[in-house]
Image (spheres, coloured by chain):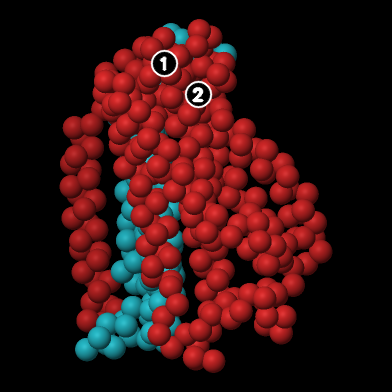
Amino acid sequence: MTPRQRRWIFLAAVAGLAAFYLWGLRGLPGFGNYPGPYGDIINRIAVAQTKATGVVSAVNFEYRGFDTVGEEFILFVAATGMAVVLRRLRGERERDRQDPTADLTVPPASDAVRLVALIFTGPVVVMGWFLASHAQTSPSGGFQGGVVLASAFFLIYLSGQFLLFRRISPVDLTEAVEAVGAGGFAAVGVSAVAMGLPYLKNFLPLGTTPGAVSSSGTIALISFFVGLEVAAAFVLIVGELVDQTLLIRQGDR
Amino acid sequence: MHIVPFMVVVWILAVGLYGIVTSCHLVHLIMCLIVVQSSTYVLLLGVGYKTGAVAPYFYDIPVHTPAVDPVVQALALTDVVVEAAVTALLLALAIQAQKRFGTLDPQELVQLKG
């Protein structure tokens, strides 16, 4: 098929899609006229029921908790899948990390990049933990916090310190942290079952003040585990890609 | 009826699909897939929006303030995570395709398969 034919078939298909979409829009309430009722109900009862003022987190880690377990394991499986796809293949060798003659330096980062990376690493770690630990109060949570936390490691890599990046995030340790994060979430759910409650039922004391960091029971706990899992998964994913560039070489030596 | 946000959705979707169809580089194709998926964020958030409502966070506002639907926001969050995971996996596959076949052009890859 020539690119031209391909383009015409695409245009015909997209015209059909647009027609169906417009037809479907006629039956939808217009933008800004949210019909409810689920969102309205949850907004009304969530704060009283969970003592969490961040209703999105309450939905994620409490009402839809079971779905979020699955979502978290998508990330887990993707990180595992990357490790499998990017393993050392036949006909490739891995360069020795300790070999002083091996050229493990990335093209040198400019002083400006190194300075910015250095300045931001600490604050980014604090920011990540803050986000991961405040799911119950404000627009944050384990997913966001985990990604921010992982970017602290990327800043270290960005400043040209590949060996340091690997020393502070060894693959074994990162994998262990990821497993603890993913398993911890599931374990919170199973603990509820062990107490004779439904899976992922909030079994911890909820506290009395909505919006306090210590309130909302398992929401905060799950958010913490999700933060661990997400941070470790992203460090693992980026680490795999970096290894590909720097360590894996063609030929059997 | 106010439908501009929903038109934006289909526009982003179509632009991304166009990129996928005409792509001649796997990394470009993966980026286009991200664009396609971005349209779902706009759709989800657009569906849950209520005119004049605030974000569903009641830390410093009364509980009965009208707020937008938190369920679709949670879904959008799911969406972002899945997108990141899928993208990472696809990029890994692209690396292996480059290694094995020496090209990232989808057209050439098809021809190599025979």
Q: Residues within 10 Å of mark 1 (few under 14, many from 20)?
A: many
Disc 1: which chain? A
Dot 2 crowding, Cα within 10 Å, few <14, some 14–19, many 20+: many
Up-down relation of residue A132 to residue A148 (above or below): above
Q: Can you tell which quarter of the image residue A104 is in?
A: bottom right
Q: Is residue A7 left or right of residue A211?
A: left
Amino acid bearing label 1:
Thr
Chain containing mark 2: A
Specify the colour of chain B. Answer: cyan
For the N terminus of chain B, the image quarter is: top left
Q: Residue A81: x, y in percent? A: 37, 62
Quarter of the image where one finds residue A159: bottom right
**Precedes in sequence: disc 1 or disc 2:** 1
Q: Tags 1 and 2 in contact by the CB under 8 Å rule?
A: yes
Query: Which residue matches tag 1?
Result: A50
- Residue in the image at 80% along x and 56% along y: A115
Q: Secondary structure at mark 2?
A: loop
Residue A239: give x, y in percent of width and height.
Answer: 55, 63
Give percent across and percent down for residue B50. Answer: 38, 23
The spot of residue B102 in percent (x, y) is 42, 87
For the colour red, the matching chain is A
Please name whichever residue, A47 or A182, is drawn nearer the observer in this view of the structure.
A182
For residue A253, side relative to residue B112 (left or right): right
Tag 1 secondary structure: helix
Q: Which mark is residue A93?
A: none
Q: Is residue B89 visible?
A: no
Q: Is residue A152 above or below residue A132?
A: below
Q: Residue furthest front?
A: A194
Identify the residue shown where x is 18% and y is 47%.
A20
Identity, as a three-letter code, of the amino acid under mark 2: Gln
